[in-house]
Image (tube, grey):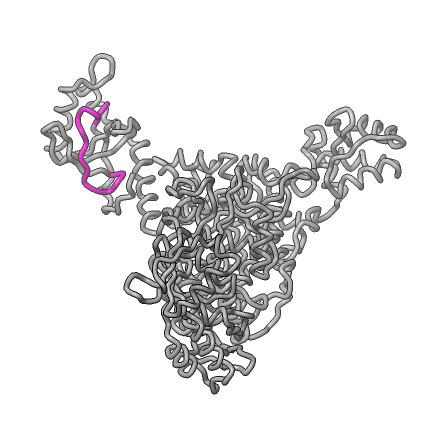
Amino acid sequence: MSGNSLLDWLRASEDAALVALLRARPDLAVPPPPDMTVLATRAGIRASVNRACEDLDTVTLAVLEGLAVAGADTEPVPPARLRELFGNQIKAKRMAAALDTLRERALAWGEPAVRLVPAALEVASRYPAGLGRSAAALADPKIVAALLADTPDAERRVLDALAVGPPIGRSREPGAAVVQRLLAKGLLLRVDPETVELPREVGLALRGPAPLRGLVADEPTLDVTEPGADRVDGTAAGAVLELLRRAETLLTAWSAEPPPVLRSGGLGVRDLRKASRDLGMDVAETGLLIEVLVAAGLVADSEGTGSATAGSEWVPTTQVDLWAAGGPEQRWVALARAWLELPRLPGMIGQRDGDGPGDRILGPMSDELRRPLAPRDRRRVLEALAELPPGQGVATPERLAGVLAWRAPRRGGRLRDQMVAWTVAEATLLGVVALGAVSGPGRALLDSPDLATNSAPVLAALRRSLPEPVDKVLLQADLTAVAPGPLRPDVAEEMALVADVESAGGATVYRITEASILRALDTGRAPSELHELFATRSATPVPQGLSYLIDDVARRHGRLRAGVARSFLRADDAVLLAEVLAHPSSDAWELRRIAPTVLISDLPLVSLLDGLRAAGFSPAAEAGDGTVLDLRPRGRRIPAKPRPAAARSGLPTLDPNQLTALVASVRAGEHAATMRPSSDALRRAGDSNGRNGSAATLDLLRGAAQQRRSVWIGYINSLGVASRRIVEPVSVGGGVLEGYDRQQGDLRRFMLHRITSAAVVEDPDARPDPQPDSGA
């Protein structure tokens, strides 16, 4: 199958080939092309050709450059000519596959000889294969050979250097005289007063047989490691638990003390470093966690939320409470999904926005981090890593960057290679990757097309990786409690109430102190409840020292009872109240006696309690009914902001049915564009100026409906877009033409006042089978 032009090639192509073209180059389908002429025109536009070349691998790009060198933009080039250019470096099957890829994307057409889309010359490379532009005066190889034969060694060395590529050089002393002689012979061309260029014909002659041999390289191999699937998943599970713990820590800290939003947007360097110290993470990891929490809707800018605080701050949202109520699987999926769809580059955090020493350091949530195509590139890195079997990974991301650069050399450069390293590091922190390999949950994450509606496979994969939650701790004589694994949520909540986390990791160590016991008593827990808690939740005997600590704190706790007067203080022992009044700080507490056992204060209850405890007393907060009042700080919350839709990493992808319908529409549009109206119909329907009169148009349409003949109509839709349609009228009346639209493949209604012209077509083809509505 061949054709004189790309349009002829497309017209002669099978529908399956057109579907493959639109799948490989989705920009050609937006908006839907009305006919083949429009499709072919779009396929040759420079911007579209440039986009189509982005995913071509090194070999296919080399073949594309080989076609450019062989002049395929002006005349067909047989595959044998390409093989001569490359020698035996590209095998026949690989060459055929590369040409098929170019044909599939309509960058080239024709078989067996191949033509090249002219725009590809500008897109592929300014100097394809390192060769310069052609010179008409050197078109005859015999002339080039004769000139080179008479070239002295000094001049030949200059030509040989430029023949390797690039073909551009500067004429400087002491070689200026040599260059001048080469220019006089026509073996060099002048580009500007200081620059010369080696003509393509000379470069090809100097390179000798197979002049493009050095262009193609085999795909680099990965330095594969084999830690094993079980070890990878176990390590990833540990990273997941640590990630969730640190996320909870940051949310708790920012609930109590939200950091401000910079005037330029984002988080300040000082606040970033403080969070980094509190979490025990480096600045890059902390910045990533903050970006993910904001993307997941767990933290937001308080501006516009009705917050009474002056200035905007980064504050946890009400979504945090719902997130915290879920299991570790649900919490991780929310964070992992937010990261995978994040249209930003957290890896740039800590870099400067310029090269000068006074340039600003980029922080989390800075506008400079925005990259709409980041989700596409991030997924590309992970999918390349996931090509390895489960349990296999890479030792370093550099080799993986080399593989991706070979597969798509036109994509990126330094930033592309940095993106590979950033993605692997970020995925490792989140547990998507561990030990250089994609984890089981990570594979499920990549394989899930819509995490927003169906995350069950990911949840199941992570559940298999995480250790079984435990409901017991190991109490030690030094008043520590060790959780040998992740605690059941209700047990973790109980331990957080009565103890402080001293260290976290595979096993969490809690420290039980007087302050933590006092905190539990402040929530209304009775001493007997604390004794029972430790007895039932410990797999080891309760140390006697812990029992003594509980009883001692409980004995002193609550002897003073504070309430709201604005606040009050009461005790069964009047002597104790007298001791309080005699304390040097009593004036600051603004206390006054209203009864032998009751004092009142104008201070808020929390302030009064803090002052008394700082002085060595142990008051308990009391509600109006005499019960202990839980005054634990709840932290600030702001309303959750609507989560933006996941950023598209490119043009919308049409499903097979939509692509088939679109091809059918293009075929019908092509048929309509090339169909000739009946000359009799034109004479009957047109006025003296060749335009349809309304009455004549109505008569023509009614006659076509009676005779079941197809008509060609010009139509303007409600958006003012004009088109040509082939319609088989069924009924005409009430201001509406109802008929079978050959282009859309179904029954349609057309407003008569929008029909600009009509004519009966000559012997239309048989009506095609109905196709699904493409939405056009």
Residue 30 position by quadrant: top left
Asked if residue 411 is positioned above or below residue 710 in the image, the reply reads: below
Residue 26 point in image, percent of width and height? 42, 44
Which is the main secondary structure of the residues drawn in magenta?
A: strand
- Residue nearer the viewer, 183 or 580: 580
Residue drawn at (13%, 27%) of the image: 735
Quadrant for the C terminus in the image: top left
Quadrant for the N terminus in the image: top left
Can residue 322 be seen? no
Image: magenta residue range:
742-759
Can residue 395 be seen? yes
Side (left or right) of 117 relative to 470: right
**474 magenta-colored:** no
**756 magenta-colored:** yes
Residue 570 point in image, percent of width and height? 37, 64
Residue 38 position by quadrant: top left
Residue drawn at (59%, 35%) of the image: 122
Side (left or right) of 420 relative to 606: right
